[in-house]
Amino acid sequence: MKLCLWSAVTALAATFADASVLNPPVLPLIVRNPYLSIWLPQARDAPWKNWPMFWRGETVGFAVMASVPHSRTVYPLLGRPQDFLDRHNPNYNISLPHYDGATFDASTTNLTYTIRDSDIKITLSFLSPITPTSTLRQALPASYLTCFVEGSTDVSLYIDVNGEWVSGRRESKIQWELEESRTHQSEARLKTWRIARAQEQLFTEMLDRAEWGTLRVSAPADVKYQSGESRRTRQMFAEFSSLKNEIDDSYRGIFEDEPIFAFSKTFKLSKNLTSSSHLHHDSVVFTFALTQDPVVQFASARGLTLMRPLWASHFFTAEEMIQYHYNDYDTAVHLARNYSDQLARDAYASGSRDYQDIAALSARQVLGATQFSGTPDSPILFLKEISSNGNFQTVDVIFPAFPFFLYTNPQWLAYLLEPLLEHQLSGQYPNDYSMHDLGAHFPNATGHSDGNDEYMPVEECGNMLIMGLALANALRDDTQPAFTPRALPWTKPLGLGPGKSPLSLDAHGMDSTHEDMGTTGEKAAAKWLRRSYKLWIKWTGYLVRESLIPANQLCTDDFAGWLANQTNLALKGIVGIKAMSSIAEMVGEESDAKYYGDIADEYIDKWQEFGLSRDKTHAKLAYNWYGSWTTLYNIYADALLCFHLPDEDSTAGGKGLWDLDQIPLSDTGTGKSKPKSKKFIPDHIYQMQSDWYHNVLQRYGLPLDSRHLYTKSDWEFFAAAVASKKVRTQILQNVAGWVNETATDRPFTDLYDTEGDGGFPGINFMARPVVGGHFAFLALERACQGKATEGLMFLDSTAPAEIDVRQVLATDAAENQPQVGEL
């Protein structure tokens, strides 16, 4: 039987009512893509003390109020609408509710209030659903706000938005209209505000906001509506607890007699009460969508292409999409709750309650940097390098984010890599190493035909090879998302849409499995790798020449500057070569597999000679920088790619690969074959680094290296994932302390000081998708058919060694130094 709206959503809200143990400075409200990205600032304060903000920090007009007609009192809930009310108006009073606080999970942020001296309780539940088993739903550029009310007294709710949602220019002229849907009897009838720039500027940004596209705010047909000057409209609601169904059609600038667009809804909670202690509850659902068509321009194999949104392949019009999204609410709640529940269980088992919150807080932020495009049978996922410089499809931003995609849905990682592979396979990029990005600024993926993109050749080649093999392994092992593959039974089937029915999803918009499509994961992996084999070979050739002793260049931590002989960067390149050996093996190129495997084995031995301190207590920042150290986060790829599985007994499983009458070349003359180690990087390197992290940990986490006390949270989690459980726990506790105490005031930064107030280190990164690296534990636990972590169990056999860091570094720096120039 179909759940009623209240029971379905209340179940979601109640499940996580006490789930949040961390108190971050900013919380996601409506976060769907780089342009639909609304956050609650100063989240440790009451939500009516500040206006909501765009991810950059600029305010956005978005207000919510409640009114109790019985007492003629109005209460601000979100934003600062109270600033526009007349405190001396005899027709209403202004008061503040009691704020019960915020809770959140991966898809939802709940803000809960109680009205003083009454039994009224109000919850604003913001849902940007993460649906790993329904790419179609994830591609919809829309979010939900459900307002729950509970009590025995009538109460009215009010929301409004302004034109700041559709332009970063305060002087932009906007136009608007109210649209009322004409739908089938089985569908909810809607009222929708449509707001857009009067003259849109395609593929243009101002302060990172899109200057094209239409904001659509939808509500059920029984709401009241009004547009008009902000002060008058808000005062109208305060005085009458309702709106007047009036439309101001004098189009003008965003702050020219600031026009706002409002809905109100009155809840008759007092009707039919038989007992004063009995409470009624009700709810209303609003949706917020930013529709753009096209979404980006992309230098594809066929030339510069205007790319349509993925949803446009399923719906003839934006209005159809909005209607579907609204009607699909129950299923969206179901899928989002399933993902959040599973993530909470996995994160708690992998780390702690703190880690559960950190992963939940990171999830929407990752997807908030993406934009789905392509077609149902060939989806593409575009990504903006939010806040650092706005690059399009930056390889070394996808790389730290990719654990999120491996955990959530590996196929989405394929969609992310697709435009990079297509562009370079088409010959539009002239260099013999991987490109850094597809364009200097999102949404313009116009490429770099001159080859003058940011110079990170070893970094990007290593990244692409590591991600390529990680994805192929996930496909081969059929690592399907560990979330429900089914929609609710009463989910309305998709219509025919403008395109043919794709094989990639079923009638209810759920993704198909390999089995559904008549193939296997192993075949899919080999096919995917084979298509880009010439790129894998080319990039590996570059690494063979350049990665063992990297020239002066940038790594992904480009804010730290250029540096030659980087130990951690060299390791990434060497692991990339090793990855090529496995790629070749998976597509049947045995000679290539052996060739690159041998080179990788040789290089990793030399790397240990060059990159470690003399006393072998830690890795140096650079080969010739004695007395330095680095977080060796690139060792994570060794474990993730199944290069560090536990050794097996040579007699296990009987004959194994060898016939008893045949002695392999590795035989030592005893008549028994020497068991081949499955470990590329030796155990002692992992143990060494784990111990070192224990000793250099600071108040708020693990510094990036010896140059500064700042850190990158993504790399902290990469490093912690391959450290002992005790060290992992220490790092987690310190990062959790930072989340609770940091002075940063923007969406989850990945770059912060590990001492002082935990603030920005002079470089303000915010809202970046690299927080997908916080899923490093979870991705590792799924890798190699669940065996990747078994190869690291030795780390827990002893307590971390205590090291006098100052003395060790001083001794390393003071001794005579070899001539590194001979390397």
Image: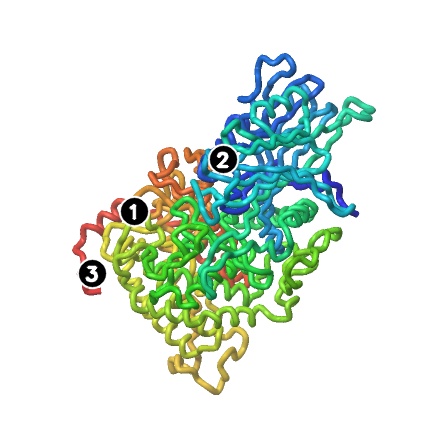
User: Which residue shows up at 37% across the image and 48% down it?
Assistant: 693
Relative to 424, does residue 4 appear above or below in the rendering? above
Identify the residue at image location x=16%, y=55%.
Answer: 816
Q: Position of residue 270 (x, y in %)?
A: 77, 24
Assess whether mark 1 and mark 3 are in contact (beta carbons under 8 angstroms). Answer: no
Q: Earlier in the sequence, mark 3 or mark 1?
A: 1
Distance in Å between CA atoms under marks 2 and 1: 36 Å
For the residue marked with disc 3, what is the amino acid? Val
Task: Find residue 361 and report its horizontal and vertical position in percent.
Answer: 52, 43
Circle 1: element type: loop
Residue 300 placement (x, y as % from top left):
46, 62
Q: To which residue does mark 2 refer? A: 53
Query: Can you identify the residue that label 3 sits on?
Result: 820
Tag 1: residue type?
Ser
Residue corresponding to mark 1: 706
N-terminal-most mark, 2 or 1: 2
- On the rendered image, what quadrant is the C terminus found in? bottom left
Three-letter code, disc 2: Met
What crowding class fits label 2: few (fewer than 14 Cα within 10 Å), some (14-19), or many (20 or more)? many
Q: Is residue 80 visible?
A: yes
The colour scheme used here is rainbow
x 54%, y 65%: residue: 475
Residue extending furthest toward the front:
250
Looking at the rendering, which quadrant does residue 565 occupy? bottom left
